[in-house]
Amino acid sequence: MKRGCVALVGRPNAGKSTLLNRLVGEKLAIVSDKPQTTRTRIVGVRRFPEGEVVFIDTPGIHRPLHRLNVRMVDAALDSLRDADVVLAVVDASEPGGAGGRYLMDIVRKARATRVLALNKVDRADKLALLPRIAAYQDVGFADIVPVSALTGENVERLERALLGHLPEGEPLYPEDHLTDRPERFFVAELVREQVLAHTHDELPFSTAVVVDKFEEGPLLRLYCTILVERASQKPILIGKGGAAIKAIGTSARQELERFFQTRVYLDLHVKVREGWREDERTLDELGLEGRRKRRRT
Ligand SMILES: Nc1nc2c(ncn2[C@@H]2O[C@H](COP(=O)(O)OP(=O)(O)O)[C@@H](O)[C@H]2O)c(=O)[nH]1
Ligand SMILES: [Mg+2]
């Protein structure tokens, strides 16, 4: 059978996480309209009649200004090195720009087979697509597939193309294995997704979620702390009379109930941790891979 790893790499906001969820058929990665939503690699396994594909979602490749972001970009580059197929995801509704060229310079050097997904074709100008495809000629893509991760348009064609490039071998994971992340990870991420949805400016980038307690029972009881970087951010996140944090809590609880298929009690607490984005200990606590913990393969 066919089997192997496909790493989704690209600029922030290209739609990698939306595409991962679409390819795996489960919501494993959170999505937002803000860049840098994904902070770590997320594995999602999908079985086809022809074989097994291990999809790896990664943080967007960008210029890292904080230690948090250094770890994020490292996680993306590590995945790219380990993959059988590198699936570059670009937003086809926008011109690539300097960031796009930087990405292609990295993808061009990958040892793995390269495939390009021109994403967001649902809102791209079809005429503008052709010259953009021409601009990718020299990157050495084995396939270029226009898709919409949002609507699912052409995603099956992409799946066929990816399967075709995978090596033969024994399955990498047991039959029921879906992801490499523990339940607590999804709790923190689903809460963070709602923080992202309800905040703007610097706040989305300055928040992280820690799961303090995970108590199973007829009611799943979850206690989380939302970290912010500065004292001035706390009242914004809480809102007038607690309105903002309440709205975040209500939506997060609904998402968590959907994910865990059970009733959920969610307790959210906001805490200031000055400059946590630069603090290696906090980054470790958040489970973000870093240079020091890089896997040897
Ligand atoms: N119109 C459209 N929007 C998309 C598509 N794929 C992703 N998006 C949107 O683009 C934004 C970023 O998506 P996300 O998956 O978080 O991007 P990532 O940073 O590359 O993981 C979100 O608002 C998505 O809803 C698509 O195919 N079409
Ligand atoms: Mg993402």
Image: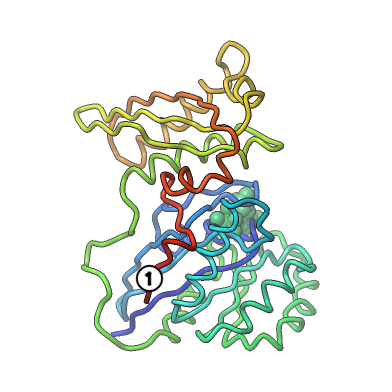
Task: Assign the N terminus to one quadrant of the image.
Answer: bottom left
Q: Nearer the viewer, residue 223 or 133?
A: 223
Q: How many marks?
A: 1
Q: Quadrant of residue 215?
A: top left
Label 1 amino acid?
Val
Q: Nearer the viewer, residue 79 or 189?
A: 79
Task: Assign the C terminus to one quadrant of the image.
Answer: bottom left
Give x and y (percent) for residue 108. 63, 83
Give x and y (percent) for residue 146. 62, 73
Q: Residue at x 56, y 83 (%)?
A: 110
Using the rendered image of the protein, determine whether residue 170 is visible from the camera's viewpoint.
Answer: yes
Give x and y (percent) for residue 216. 22, 33
Q: Identify the coloring.
A: rainbow
Using the rendered image of the protein, determine whether residue 150 is visible from the camera's viewpoint.
Answer: no
Q: Viewed as shown, does residue 243 lie left or right of 262?
A: right
**Label 1: element kind:** strand
Q: Residue at x 51, y 39 (%)?
A: 208
Quadrant of the picture in which ligand 1 is shown: bottom right
Q: Nearer the viewer, residue 99 or 68?
A: 68
Q: Residue at x 38, y 40 (%)?
A: 187
Vertical arrangement, residue 259 with respect to residue 3, above or below: above
Vertical arrangement, residue 6 with respect to residue 34, above or below: below
Per the image, the residue denoted by label 1 is 54
Give x and y (percent) for residue 101. 74, 74
Vertical arrangement, residue 85 with respect to residue 293, above or below: below
Q: Viewed as shown, does residue 42 lie left or right of 14?
A: left
Crowd rating for badge 1 (residues with CA inside 10 Å; few <14, some 14–19, many 20+): many
> Would you say the beta carbon of the disc 1 residue lies within 8 angstroms of ligand 2?
no
